[in-house]
């Protein structure tokens, strides 16, 4: 099989604008500014197609026009996505701006002519991590302006197609980007061929933009996060093409050599087995440092807690064996929509997540009962966030930088098993696979709901090839242990 990169050919690059719109601006909140120069959220949705829909002539003359038209109609509801983040010299902070007639969403149309590429991409087994890059569009950014989203539609003749999306993290969190892609799918599937008028969205897909509901809990988080970005480029020079702090240039994080990408499944049965094991040892496994929040043993544990604990411990043990690394920390992102006072609507569009580290000791992950200890720490952190979601947020980035300088491996978590990404149907059926591509930007656990619609979870990872082999062995042997 030829490399995907060499097999994918760009056929067209166009700009899709909202069907009708006026000038629009939207401020960035402190939630947004935290992610200002962070790498984009990147996903790929793969869809199987039967003949003749998968024939190039039919696909580009019938399927693509419907995708383009529905995208234009959807952007009518999501105007910020068609604009840019700008940072004029006279503005103390950046903001989102849409100019009708000038702005729109970059859309690349491509074709992969290698007959094996589609089935290879759908395989969950390890493969070269760089292969997916040819299916995800580049997101433009410079010191003064940054695109909000870019899209790529790639046809695999006689097999299917995929939609790659790259979304700026300072405008969309995971829930917001999911809302947009589901809205686009809803409009595409619902639209009549002969209709040129936009389709109305169901209430849960109609974005809510009101920024005045977002209150800075300590009154200075905006300044804190802007100041962080003014300082970080000089501290992480390898990740920035410019040391200019007053910039919108996105961090550049290349994929490490010999990295492979794979997807692992945790079924409902797997999760129940791990949960039972953890709860049976909940009170007998001692912790070196008592959690700040304590409570009696829970009656159950969420899929999120169990998945993050089990996978992070497997990652840590693989790194310990391969590279003798012993210090780890787990970073978690918490949705604050329901945690704000008062709560804001679930369809709030923008970032509404805060980052925290689980209160683990650095060697908890590699202990004999590491899964139990880490699960307890994650569970306690979640309980604490319900009472004080913003405690320590202002110092999170400096603390993270300090840990990195001390050689601590930071394991991140992206995505969610609750987003229901496998329900994203544009009219040609459910996805054959959903990939959270941007986990290759760091040591990150990517969570997606399972393709079969069950209550399990798919875990996407990118690791060094040797570390991945060890992870695979540790992951599967742990599921068969009683």
Image: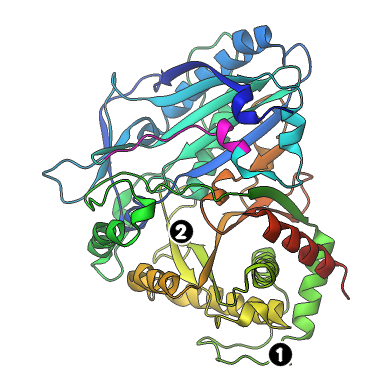
Magenta stretch encompasses residue 133? yes
Residue beneath label 1, please?
285
Write the residue at 76% across / 40% down.
123
Write the residue at 65% across / 76% down.
375
Q: Position of residue 57 (x, y in %)?
A: 66, 7
Q: Which residues lie in the magenta part?
A: 131-142
Q: Nearer the viewer, residue 350 or 124?
A: 124
Q: What's the coloring here? A: rainbow
Which structural element holds mark 1? loop
Is 478 located above or below residue 345 in the figure?
A: below
Q: Position of residue 408 (x, y in %)?
A: 50, 73
Marking on residue 67: none
Write the residue at 66% across / 48% down.
260
Q: Is tag 2's residue or tag 1's residue first in the polypeptide sequence?
A: 1
Q: Position of residue 465 (x, y in %)?
A: 68, 53
**Left or right of residue 218: residue 416:** right
Q: Is residue 437 visible?
A: yes
Residue beneath label 2, please?
337
Q: Position of residue 460 (x, y in %)?
A: 66, 51
Write the residue at 54% across / 11% down.
195
Q: Is residue 432 visible?
A: no
Residue 160, quarter of the rendered image: top right
Quarter of the image containing the N terminus? Answer: top right
Q: Nearer the viewer, residue 462 or 282?
A: 462
Task: Count neighbours of disc 2 (C-alpha within 10 A) and say few if under 14, some if 14 to 19, many if 20 or more.
Answer: some
In contact (CB < 8 Å): disc 2 and disc 1: no
């Amino acid at each position: 099989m030829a490399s995907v990169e060499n097999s994918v050919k760009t056929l067209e690059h166009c700009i899709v604008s909202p069907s009708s719109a006026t000038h629009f601006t939207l401020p960035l909140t402190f939630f947004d500014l935290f992610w200002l120069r962070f790498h984009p959220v990147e996903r790929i949705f793969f869809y199987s197609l039967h003949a003749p829909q998968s024939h190039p002539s039919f696909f580009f003359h019938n399927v693509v026009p419907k995708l383009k038209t529905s995208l234009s109609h959807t952007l009518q509801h999501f105007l910020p996505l068609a604009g840019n983040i700008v940072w004029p010299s006279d503005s103390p902070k950046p903001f989102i701006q849409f100019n009708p007639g000038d702005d729109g969403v970059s859309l690349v149309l491509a074709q992969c002519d290698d007959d094996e590429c589609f089935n290879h991409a759908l395989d969950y087994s390890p493969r070269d991590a760089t292969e997916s890059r040819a299916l995800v569009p580049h997101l433009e950014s410079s010191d003064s302006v940054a695109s909000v989203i870019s899209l790529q539609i790639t046809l695999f003749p006689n097999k299917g197609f995929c939609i790659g999306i790259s979304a700026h993290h300072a405008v969309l969190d995971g829930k917001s980007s999911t809302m947009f892609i589901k809205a686009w799918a809803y409009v595409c599937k619902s639209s009549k061929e002969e209709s040129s008028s936009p389709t109305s969205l169901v209430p849960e897909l109609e974005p809510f933009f009101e920024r005045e509901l977002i209150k800075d809990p300590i009154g200075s988080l905006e300044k804190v996060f802007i100041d962080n970005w003014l300082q970080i480029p000089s501290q992480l020079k390898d990740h920035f093409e410019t040391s200019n702090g007053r910039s919108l240039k996105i961090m550049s994080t290349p994929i490490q050599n010999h990295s492979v990408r794979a997807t692992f499944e945790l079924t409902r049965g797997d999760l129940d087995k791990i949960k039972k094991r953890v709860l049976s040892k909940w009170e007998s496994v001692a912790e070196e440092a008592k959690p700040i929040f304590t409570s009696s043993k829970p009656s159950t544990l969420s899929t999120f807690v169990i998945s993050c604990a089990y996978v992070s411990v497997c990652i840590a043990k693989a790194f310990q064996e391969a590279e003798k690394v012993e210090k780890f920390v787990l970073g978690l992102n918490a949705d604050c929509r329901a945690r704000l006072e008062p709560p804001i609507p679930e369809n709030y569009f923008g970032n509404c997540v805060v980052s925290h580290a689980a209160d683990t000791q650095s060697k908890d992950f590699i202990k004999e009962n590491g899964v139990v200890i880490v699960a307890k720490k994650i569970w306690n952190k979640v309980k604490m966030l319900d009472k004080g979601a913003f405690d320590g947020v202002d110092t999170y980035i400096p603390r993270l930088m300090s840990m990195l300088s001390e050689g601590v491996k930071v394991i991140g978590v992206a995505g969610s098993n609750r987003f229901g990404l496998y329900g994203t149907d544009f009219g040609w059926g459910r996805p054959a696979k959903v990939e959270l591509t941007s986990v290759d930007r760091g040591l990150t656990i990517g969570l997606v709901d399972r393709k079969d619609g069950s209550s399990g979870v798919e875990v996407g990872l990118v690791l060094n090839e040797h570390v991945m082999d060890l992870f695979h062995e540790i992951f599967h042997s742990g599921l068969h242990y009683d």
